[in-house]
Amino acid sequence: MFKSFKVLSLLTMLVFGASTAYGSGLTFGDSEYWVVSGNRISWNDAKSAAEAQGGHLAAVTSVEEQRFIQDSLLSGHRGEFWLGAFQSEDPGLSAPKDNWNWVTGESWDYSNWYRTEANNAGNRDEKYLGIWSKQGWHWNDEGHLGNIKGYVVEKSLNNAPTPVPAAIWLLGAGLAGVFGLRKKYGRS
Ligand SMILES: [Ca+2]
Ligand SMILES: [Ca+2]
């Protein structure tokens, strides 16, 4: 009975979690965007939070999208905000602009680095992408949290949100795994 209660709670959490209203964002093209405040939040925590809200950290793949984000979405904000890009491998000071990827898998054709970025400042491991008011909303490779004020979420309006079906599928796989294991070990 306790197990059923736990499963029910998890399902309830998924359903209500998914319907949390974050829909006060702005629309550009076929996506909706919003800014979430988070003083010194890590890139990984921001990424998870954006996905929990039904979107992903924003992938800025054109000059038009960049202008929308800096002139409309981030208008009135100050500080540095995470975008959805990371460096899969950081060659260090020799090539700080190499090996960048969008979390969406979109190709890395457009970039908007500040004139001195990406720079692995102070030879730090700067492998996540920030957009920073101090640099005129150009991009910065960032590796510490001192300037981070939050993150930018993008959510496609075309596709049905995937987190819920994915979560339920995972839940199903998890339960199947648990029962499978029990069966396996129950026999030995
Ligand atoms: Ca985008
Ligand atoms: Ca940098």
Image (cartoon, grey):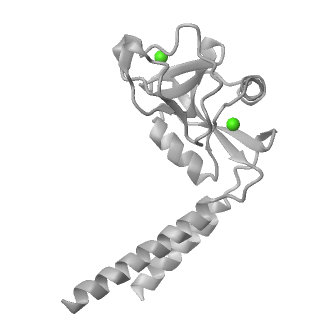
Residue at 58% x, 41% y is: 105
Residue at 49% x, 75% y is: 172
In the rendered image, residue 96, in percent from the top left (x then y), is placed at 45, 18
What is the residue that sits farthest to the top in this orientation? 115
Q: Nearer the viewer, residue 9 or 143?
A: 143
Residue at 62% x, 51% y is: 53
In the rendered image, residue 4, in percent from the top left (x then y), is placed at 46, 84
Tell me how many marks there are.
0
Q: Quadrant of the N terminus?
A: bottom left
In the rendered image, residue 32, in percent from the top left (x then y), is placed at 75, 43
Residue at 45% x, 23% y is: 146
Q: Quadrant of residue 68?
A: top right
Q: Quadrant of the C terminus?
A: bottom left
In the rendered image, residue 79, in percent from the top left (x then y), is placed at 59, 21
What is the residue that sits farthest to the left in this orientation? 188
Vertically, is 19 above or below 61? below
Q: Quadrant of residue 126?
A: top left
What is the residue that sits farthest to the bottom in this orientation? 187
Q: Nearer the viewer, residue 148 or 164?
A: 164
Q: Nearer the viewer, residue 38 or 27?
A: 27
Vertically, is 60 above or below 25? above
Q: Nearer the viewer, residue 63 or 5?
A: 63
Q: Is residue 142 left or right of residue 31?
A: left
Q: Is residue 93 left or right of residue 31?
A: left
